[in-house]
Amino acid sequence: MRSRFPSSSSFAYSFGPGPLTPAIKVIVAANVGAFLLALIVPAITLRLGLRPADVVGSFALWQPVTYMFLHGGIFHILFNMLALWMFGVELERMWGSRFFVKFYFVAGVGAAVTTLLLSFAPFAFANQLYYSLTIGASGAVYGVLLAYARYFPHRPILLYFVFPIPAKYFVMIIGAISLLSAMSGGGGIAHATHLGGLVAAYLYLKSGTRMHVMAEIKYRYLKWRINRMRRRFDVYSGGRSADDVDRRVH
């Protein structure tokens, strides 16, 4: 007799995109490990967080990478890792782990570079940004979100966890918010870094699209040449049939 109630396995993937993929699992573990280490040794946050004055003045060139693994509190890391899981899992499945990791770091480091460049801008917020400490994976996560919106533009995302908005419009809205907020000072949030993650991800995917187009053109050209050579030398796959007894290569 069949049970009227679904088994527990029926609910395994009822929320979110499913289990963590390999690269995201490693990224989450690294973030959690760095977060716990920073709780034990708080000084590493000052050393590994992104501070333009240190990168330029003290040549702390590791900071544009290491800042991505530090967070300011439990909710900070929780929301970043939750967003990485929700929007990154499908991308890693589609791209493969190697390309996803490369993209993640391009977005995160690109966000840091944007922060560094904006700290020298001739605006009032630039001086504050130059001496500010930025931590968190948000720049890379914003890049992941942009990629998600590009591949799944009509998927609904809850704005402020209330209003369902297609992913492509959601990214436009948060991009505009990041730009305006960065220019007004940020209010303690690294909006410039968020914006940088969006820009870096867009440029990287755009350049990748051009590379894919060129690769496709090259593939089509080579395929045409091979078929042309086959016709020229009368080469056929699948062996010879009875009709090919008198066939010769010219």
Image (cartoon, rainbow, N blue to C red):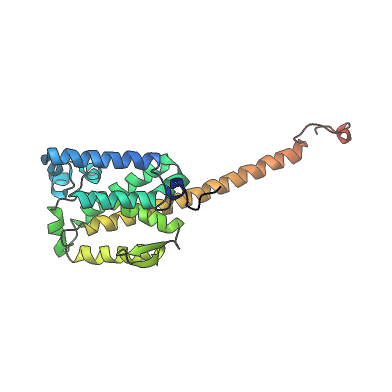
The residue at the point 20 percent across, 47 percent down is 71
Q: Can residue 212 be spotted in the picture? A: yes
Instruction: Give percent across and percent down for residue 214.
Output: 52, 48
Q: Image quadrant of residue 31?
A: top left
Lateral position of residue 209 relative to residue 71, left or right: right
Q: Give x and y (percent) for residue 153.
A: 44, 61
Nearer the observer, 47 or 210: 47
* Rendered position, 152 above or below 98: below
Q: How many marks?
A: 0
Give x and y (percent) for residue 125: 15, 62
Seen as rendered, the residue at the extreme front is 1
Camera-nearest residue between 187 and 160: 160
Quarter where residue 191 is shown: bottom left
State the image coordinates of residue 23 (x, y, percent, origin top left): 37, 40
Residue 111 visible? The answer is no
For the C terminus, the quadrant is: top right
What residue do we see at 48% from left, 48% from top? 211
Nearer to us in this view, 99 or 164: 164
Identify the residue at horizontal 67%, vertical 40% (top origin): 226
Tell me: 229 left or right of 194.
Answer: right
